[in-house]
Amino acid sequence: MFDDFFARALAGGIGVALATGPLGCFMVWRRMAYFGDSIAHSALLGVLLGVVLGIDLNGGIILMCVALALLLLLLQQQRRLATDTLLGILAHGTLALGLVGISFLQSVRVDLMTYLFGDILAITGRDLIWIYGGGGAVLVATALIWRPLLAVTVHEELARAEGVRAGLVRIVFTLLIALAVAIAMKIIGLILIVSLLIIPAATARRLARSPEQMALLASTIGAVAVAGGLHGSLAWDTPSGPSIVVAALALFTLCHGGAALASVFFGRVVDSARAEH
Amino acid sequence: MSALRDASTDPLTRPPQDVVEGAPLASARDLVVRYGGRTVLDRVSIEVRRREVVSLIGPNGAGKTTAVRALLGLIKPDAGVVHHAPGVVVGYVPQRIEPQELLPLTARRFLAMAGRRARADIVAVLDEVGAAPLIDRQLSDVSGGEFRRVLLARALLRNPDLLVLDEPIQQVDFAGQFAMHQLIARLRNRRGCGVLVISHDLHLVLGATDRVVCINGHVCCAGEPEAVSRHPEYISLFGPGVAAALAVYTHDPAHRHDHPIAVAPVKDGSPDAGFEPDRAD
């Protein structure tokens, strides 16, 4: 079945979407979109690290993403710079460092476009093992920290007063984001990774009544976006990664636009939008 | 998951032995907290015993919430000792919590986060705080006053030995305030828990409190409500009008600088924490 490049792409993309759906919800709830983006931008530096150390490039990416994530957690403790400033500096600083560093590499040719925008059609069987192994680990870990992470997300001090070890939970969550970024890199590239985490989750919000529903829906919507984007990419010969994001965007617009239209025609806003008053 | 919860404070796993009555459930001694260069708390002491309602009062910015957060172990004081009796379960109702509109969460689900999940328990505790109809409502849809009740319910669901309430009647209507006073008294009497409450509410402070600690960066005075209400530092903090509203008889404000005497706690037994014997500068 996976002899066909398209089937492999579909399987890989859907695997990534399923694994990142619940994490994406937490990124939305915790307002960490830019945090995830900064981690993703450091991935190129991770490629460089992998080449220099002579290890698997995925390993290099994970190492670098984890290092940056922990650095961010540390730097957020200080009060001199606002978090968004800090994230901007690290996101673009690490991307620029990665680009400059890679230009020094004489021996290895690194295809930048692959890392920046992904190359889902070039997924190999080995990549699939990597995606399903890593993605499965991310899902299991997310399920394991689900309750305490949710408690910390709703109100950190309350959770801590009730005995949840918020610091530990936050570190595990951050490591999971780093892992997810490394897994999704091949599919969609570091520039667009966060959209694959954020857009399905934001779409799911409109339809969900509980956190678990929202996580499940986010995974499903992400998978649908991958399938739709890939088929569109094949039909119209468009770049695959961006096509997936466009598909996700279309679902988001459909869902939120549909709800807004319903409120106009039926005089009331569907479910969650009541919160907006 | 259990590894992510501190077993000693989890009501599901805590050891069965009860807390010895008389010893403080939680105490903080000589807390010093600094933010940047500013000293927010200067040698503040608080303690709460079983069946005791302690009110923490003071003007805005006096460090009340900071003191409570230190007592709960949420911040690490720069100096001082915080001690909890072994096995004490704390129910905490924070002052502010922003319901997140991005996170779909019903009141029932929010309460289930306290650790016990049986629906009957949740229904019972919501009933106790008069918020039963809210059980299946999304938190993003409840009002500020309603949300405070849900928060209180979550604290009670843990079956706490010590209940810590930060401004419990903010945004609560008058009937709700009365109910809150009754509830606090009932909790103390029936459940036997200690209550620490930060409040500006003079009725609560006078009516339902065993002991008042008045702070403004430092402990100004501490003792029984009437005694504190006559204390010069208290009067200079809140003004003679407010003080008179609370005091059983009025103290002549003109004398306040001549009598910088701390109030002796009238309770029998050991000397009170929070009591500073000589604050004459």
Image (cartoon, grey):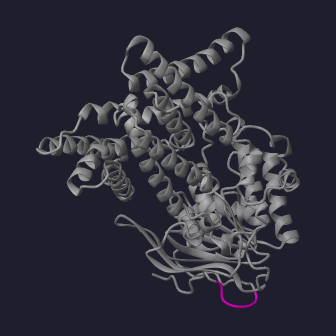
Q: Give percent across and percent down for residue A216.
A: 64, 37
Give the total number of marks visible in the rendering.
0
Q: Is residue A133 above or below residue A109?
A: below
Q: Residue at x 59, y 63 (%)?
A: A160
Which quarter shows the C terminus of chain A? top right
Q: Magenta stretch? A: B268-272
Residue A25 located within the stretch drawn in magenta: no
Question: Is B89 placed left or right of A70 in the picture?
Answer: right
Q: Give percent across and percent down for residue A198.
A: 49, 34
Question: Is B138 placed left or right of A10 in the picture?
Answer: right
**Magenta portion: prevailing SS class:** loop
Q: Give percent across and percent down for residue B25.
A: 70, 79
**In this view of the protein, which residue sits in the foreground, B214 or A207?**
A207
Q: Give percent across and percent down for residue B185.
A: 83, 65
**In this view of the protein, which residue sits in the foreground, B182 or B229?**
B182
**In this view of the protein, which residue sits in the foreground, B69 or A187?**
A187
Q: Is residue A183 above or below residue B237?
A: above
Answer with the quarter of the image where residue B60 lies: bottom right
Answer with the quarter of the image where residue A21 lies: top right
**In this view of the protein, which residue sits in the foreground, B263 or A211?**
A211
Q: Is residue B227 above or below residue A134?
A: below
